[in-house]
Image (cartoon, rainbow, N blue to C red):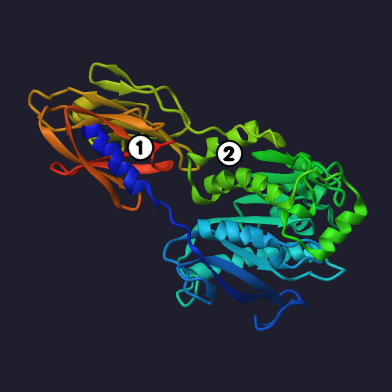
């Protein structure tokens, strides 16, 4: 009966668990005093870089307040003689999910200078980061510290030029049917030092994948890189309908076999978990991306990437000493949910701390971790400290909570923002279902002892 009530409670609380944001918009003009030209006015002396900025808001509209919270920035380069609003499909999809999208409007004519556009992407990334630090800015403290450079066609090739310099410290590069540029994006790709994802349409007759997208991907070295070719996909179908792009593609030939909405769906299915992992530091999204990459029959993929999520370490106990295998990851030990200062090695002598629930976490450079718990009875005859185990952790949906007492205890389950999802009782041992909750991090707290542990839903 208790299990049924818990499942019902979690189901009810899970409804509307993640509400999308509205879309706010404002125009901002940046300037680069070291250059001239550009597009727009009012940014100051030098080159004008007018940008259309779309951001999460509580009310849709122009110049409305940005929602509270911190969000990743994505700087997006447009295609040849294409306008920023051709990418409304990206705006409508990603801004409600909590991304800020920035579209520089420079180099929109028939004689674009690719290197200037690449520098505009870099400057825009740097200027957006500066707004986050300016307490008079609309975007003050609205950035989560992660940003991407991306683009389509000419903007995709220019994104490669920008990433090869990366003076704006972009975290990832995403190119959609990237076009070769002057100077050559292919030639500079070996200088790219950030994770790279290239999307291609197999029927692209505007920028031939064999002479544009694939050579750029091949030239990227020493980073985690992926190449996704959409079977039957087009060049222009990454964007919404654009007269100039669509005319060019229709005149170029090709044998497009899917619709534009289908190509959008395929792109977003792969891109969603990729962005969520890299830009929102959502570790469970990585296996979602790799599974999509490997199993989606609508695409062909290539990759060169050794990254995997940290596995849960195996704890071995020898008397009062706990140990895990040697690892290059960062190690942290915890007792009853409290981190033990200075315990960052593969072994720990629990005799120094007494009995309780010991947890070890191994964390990589992305902040993703693996963890394992072990209850230790050292000194429990004299130390009656309450502790509890949660396993398996991470869990696919069902976890067991086990305590060291038969007393009835009250537990709260809350999300990462502190919102209480459910409250229930446990006596010695009980099952907890997270099956109706989204993947992510949650917290279990015993109200009477105020002890807390996190649990990860894969």
Position of the C terminus by quadrant: top left
Q: Is residue 160 visible?
A: no
Question: Could you say which is closer to the camera, residue 443 or residue 93?
Answer: 93
User: Where does label 2 land, which residue?
Assistant: 289
For disc 2, the neighbor class at 10 Å (few under 14, some 14 to 19, many from 20) is some
Q: Is residue 173 above or below residue 346?
A: below
Question: Could you say which is closer to the camera, residue 168 or residue 108?
Answer: 108
Question: Could you say which is closer to the camera, residue 190 or residue 132?
Answer: 132
* Relative image position of residue 215 (x, y in whole percent): 82, 42
* Relative image position of residue 54 (x, y in whole percent): 58, 67
Q: Quadrant of residue 351?
A: top left
Position of the N terminus by quadrant: top left
Q: Is residue 90 above or below residue 356?
A: below
* Relative image position of residue 431 (x, y in whole percent): 27, 29
Q: Residue at x 72, y 74 (%)?
A: 34
Distance CA(mark 1)–CA(mark 2) = 21 Å
């Amino acid at each position: 009966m208790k299990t049924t009530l818990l499942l019902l409670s979690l189901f009810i609380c899970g409804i509307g668990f993640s509400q999308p944001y509205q879309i706010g918009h404002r125009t901002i003009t940046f300037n680069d005093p070291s250059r001239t030209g550009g597009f727009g006015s009012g940014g100051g002396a030098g080159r004008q870089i007018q940008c259309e900025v779309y951001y999460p808001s509580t009310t849709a509209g122009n110049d409305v307040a940005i929602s509270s919270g911190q969000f990743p920035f994505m700087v997006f380069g447009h295609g040849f003689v294409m306008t920023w609003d051709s990418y409304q499909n990206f705006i409508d999809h990603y801004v409600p999910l909590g991304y800020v999208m920035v579209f520089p409007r420079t180099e929109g004519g028939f004689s674009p200078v690719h290197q200037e556009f690449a520098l505009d992407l870099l400057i825009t990334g740097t200027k957006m980061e500066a707004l986050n630090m300016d307490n008079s800015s609309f975007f003050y403290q609205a950035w989560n510290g992660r940003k991407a450079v991306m683009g389509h066609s000419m903007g995709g090739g220019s994104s490669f030029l920008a990433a090869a310099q990366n003076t704006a410290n972009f975290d990832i590069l995403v190119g959609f049917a990237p076009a070769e540029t002057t100077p050559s994006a292919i030639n500079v790709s070996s200088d790219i030092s950030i994770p790279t994802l290239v999307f291609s349409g197999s029927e692209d007759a505007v920028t031939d994948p064999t002479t544009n997208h694939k050579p750029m991907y091949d030239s990227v070295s020493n980073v985690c890189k992926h190449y996704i070719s959409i079977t039957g996909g087009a060049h222009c179908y990454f964007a919404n309908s654009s007269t100039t792009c669509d005319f060019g593609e229709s005149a170029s030939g090709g044998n497009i076999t899917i619709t534009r909405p289908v190509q959008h769906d395929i792109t977003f299915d792969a891109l969603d978990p990729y962005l969520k992992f890299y830009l929102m530091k959502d570790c469970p999204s990585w296996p979602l991306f790799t599974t999509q990459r490997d199993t989606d029959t609508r695409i062909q993929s290539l990759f060169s990437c050794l990254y995997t999520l940290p596995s849960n370490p195996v704890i071995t106990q020898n008397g009062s000493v706990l140990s895990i295998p040697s690892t290059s990851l960062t190690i942290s030990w915890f007792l009853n949910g409290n981190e033990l200062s200075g315990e960052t090695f593969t072994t720990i002598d629990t005799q120094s701390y007494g009995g309780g629930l010991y947890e070890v976490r191994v964390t990589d450079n992305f902040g993703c971790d693996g963890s394992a718990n072990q209850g230790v009875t050292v000194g429990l005859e004299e130390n009656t400290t309450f502790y509890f185990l949660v396993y398996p952790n991470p869990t696919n949906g069902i976890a067991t909570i086990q305590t060291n007492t038969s007393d009835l205890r009250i537990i709260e389950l809350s999300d990462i923002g502190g919102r209480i999802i459910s409250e229930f009782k446990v006596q010695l041992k009980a099952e907890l279902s997270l099956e109706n909750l989204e993947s992510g991090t949650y917290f279990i707290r015993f109200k009477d002892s105020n002890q807390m542990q996190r649990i990860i839903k894969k």
